[in-house]
Amino acid sequence: MNLQHRNNVQLSGAGPATMMFAHGFGCDQTMWRYLAPAFADRFKIVLFDLVGSGMSDLSAYDPKKYDTLHGHASDVLEIAEQFAEGPVVFVGHSVSATIGMLATIAAPQRFAAHIMVGPSPCYINDDDYLGGFTREDIDGLLSALESNYLGWSSSMAPAIMGSPEQPELGVELTNSFCRTDPDIAKHFARVTFLSDHRQDLSKASTPALILQCSDDIIAPVSVGEYMHRTLPSSKLEIIENVGHCPHLSAPHESTTATEQFLQTLGL
């Protein structure tokens, strides 16, 4: 299997350790254009698209394999095995933070650190857990997405991006959503928004930085605080920012927080 073709793997930088960057739902690897270059002087950089997203091989999207996030996590491990050098720092946005966590649980010896940007192990409120949505909210979101994907994308993407002072970023995310194959997007959305990996948090031993925006409609601060309490080795960093994509709308703050965290680990 040609992993480079399957996941549109792009390599740059050089160093004794590797940073892998994984994008969120409806996005692709170009979303890391402000963050990844800041580390290319001392890390090997591995950018890739999740199968079904960006310039990945859409024919490789197997609904059965990707019916859980474990399918994408297995892809991460394959990419790390073939392209990474030395210990891996995994940087995952949104659902890819959970995908990365599953990969670190499966192969903890491979990963030195995990940067989680806007993560959420479960989007649905449950007793005292505040995930940000009721089950009815999620059902309504999925119904709207499945009945009119392009219309849903046009209305949701700017709200997800936030950053009202930078409207061009909302347009970029809208266009990214609209480029995604609708059938794949509908399936991946259901897998993403109905997943619940809270029980896996305690199994993750890799040191983790949780980058949490102060105002995020997808992953509220309560989720970041829950993850920080539950992850065995984690640091929570709140970035003053509106939206779900601080690596695009607050790249300096995201880079600084990541750099400081890696320094504490000697990376």
Image (spheres, rainbow, N blue to C red):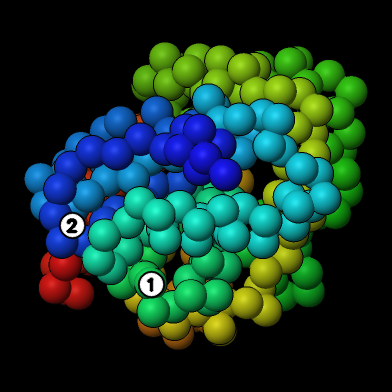
User: Residue at point 50% right, 33% down?
Assistant: 5
Direction from residue 168 to residue 173 in the image, left or right: right
Residue 219, visible in the rendered structure: no
Q: Quadrant of residue 81?
A: bottom left
User: Residue at point 38% right, 40% down?
Assistant: 47
User: Residue at point 22% right, 49% down?
Assistant: 44
Give the CA separation, mark 2 to mark 1.
20 Å
Residue 105, visible in the rendered structure: yes
Q: Work out which quarter of the rendered image holds the C terminus and state it.
A: bottom left
Q: Amino acid at mark 1?
A: Arg
Q: Nearer the viewer, residue 127 or 259?
A: 259
Q: Nearer the viewer, residue 119 or 29?
A: 29
Disc 1: which residue: 110
Q: Nearer the viewer, mark 2 or mark 1?
A: 1
Q: Quadrant of residue 236?
A: bottom left
Q: Is residue 107 above or below residue 261?
A: below
The image shows residue 100 at horizontal and vertical percentages of: 50, 61
Disc 2: which residue: 259
